[in-house]
Structure formats: C-alpha cells, structure tokens
Amino acid sequence: MKRLIAFACLWLVTGGAAHSQVYNYFSAGCALSGNATSQTVNLASGACVIGTLAAAQEPAHTGDATNVAGSLALSVVKVNGLAVPISAYVLGSNGSGQLVSASVFKQAGVSATCNSGGCTVNTAYNVASVTRSGVGQYNINFSGGTFSTSAICVAFGSSSNLAGFGTEGSNTSVEIYLYSLSGGTPALVDTSFAAICMGS
C-alpha cells in the first residue's frame, strides 16, 4: 500500500509523462579533444579521421597555385615562386626551374641568280638585297629589324653538282659561298642559288 501511494505521488509530480535525464559526458581520444561543450578534431591525426571534405570548406590557397575559398578550381600563377609570363609566345626555363619568356626563332629566305654583273633576286622573305663580293661569294642583306642576334644561313645550288654553305654573320647580313663539284676539286662559281637563314 505504501509503495502504491509513493508511485502515485511521483506520477503527480512528473505530470504523468516520461522523464529523461541529459548527461553532459565527453570522452576524448584519437583525433578528438576538448570537453563536454567544446570539441576539436585534429585533421592531421591520419587514420583517425575519415570522410571527404566538402568543396565549400576548401580554404583559399596562396603561392604558386591559387584559388577562391570554397572552390576546388586551382590556377597556376607561378612556378617555383616566379610569375608565369602570360604574354609570352614561347616559354623556356631558367637555372632555377622557373618559366621565362623565350626567344622566337625568326626566318629569312631568298633565291637569286648571280654572275659577274651582280645578283638578281628572284624571290625573297625578310631579305632586302643580295650583293656579290667575288666569284661564288655573296652577301645576303636582311630587311631592317629582322634579327636581333647573329643569323646563320644554309645555301643550296641550282643543280646537284653545286654545294653551298654560309658563315655565321651578323644580325644584318651573312656571307655565303657556292662551289662547283663537277671538276673533282671544289671551285667557287657564280650560279643561281637559294638560301634559308635563321636567328632570333
């Protein structure tokens, strides 16, 4: 009878509803530290942390590769600390492994016919004129501003028994030589030729 009365009193106090108790309990371990109301996860703890970081949580990166916070899209703006030369047509590298603007090889070409009276240019690209300095010796004179460094030319004779070569000249002209091989001993000869020149 006493137990029944005690139960009735308890039921009246709690309003006849189920009653739950909240316990503030926290157990630190592995990647988790803190207390019952504030915890910290150590992301560097290796195997203790699993899952995939949401893209929206990606921080902003600085240095060689950058992005906007919350985005996984990276932009490479530097290589080994040096900004990428975005306006360069050709890229090279320096001794530090950084990207730098590289020189672009430029070209010039000409076909001409030469004799004791001089040289007649047939077709030309970046060549202003061809002058004769002796039998089989011709100077290819480039159009102004074609090359900023010394150019090199290769010459070709108009027939199979002709051979030509060019010296390393300047950025304004190169001298070439044409030889006939028909007599067994190479001999300079006036002839028609074509030449291709390269430089930067």
Image (cartoon, grey):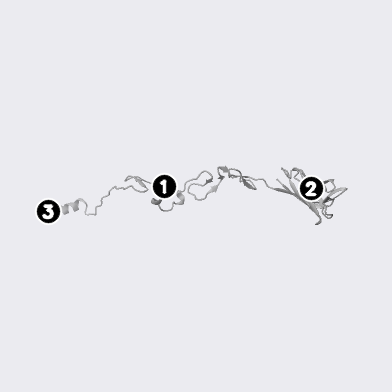
15 or 160: nearer the eye?
Answer: 160
182 or 49: nearer the eye?
Answer: 182
Given this view, does label 2 or label 3 mark the residue nearer the observer?
2
**Quadrant for the N terminus in the image:** bottom left
Picture coordinates of residue 8, whole percent (x, y): 16, 54
Residue at the outermost bottom position: 160
Residue at the outermost front position: 184
Mark 1 or mark 3, which has the lower sequence index?
Answer: 3
**Residue indicated by mark 3:** 2
Picture coordinates of residue 167, whole percent (x, y): 76, 46
Secondary structure of the residue carrying tag 2 is strand
Given this view, does label 2 or label 1 mark the residue nearer the observer?
2
The residue lying at 46 percent from left, 51 percent from top is 55
For the residue carrying disc 1, how many other residues have a C-alpha within 10 Å: few (<14), some (14-19), or many (20+)?
A: few
The residue lying at 41 percent from left, 47 percent from top is 44
- In space, the residues marked 2 and 1 are separated at their CA atoms by 69 Å
**Quadrant for the C terminus in the image:** top right
- Say left or right for 165 vs 65: right
**Residue indicated by mark 2:** 176
In the picture, residue 175 is in which quadrant?
A: top right
Picture coordinates of residue 60, whole percent (x, y): 49, 45
Secondary structure of the residue carrying tag 3 is helix
**Residue indicated by mark 1:** 44
Q: Give the amino acid type for the residue marked by disc 1 in the picture.
A: Ala
Q: Which numbered dot is residue 67?
A: none
- In space, the residues marked 2 and 3 are separated at their CA atoms by 128 Å
Q: Give the amino acid type for the residue marked by disc 2 in the picture.
A: Ile
Mark 2 or mark 1, which has the lower sequence index?
Answer: 1
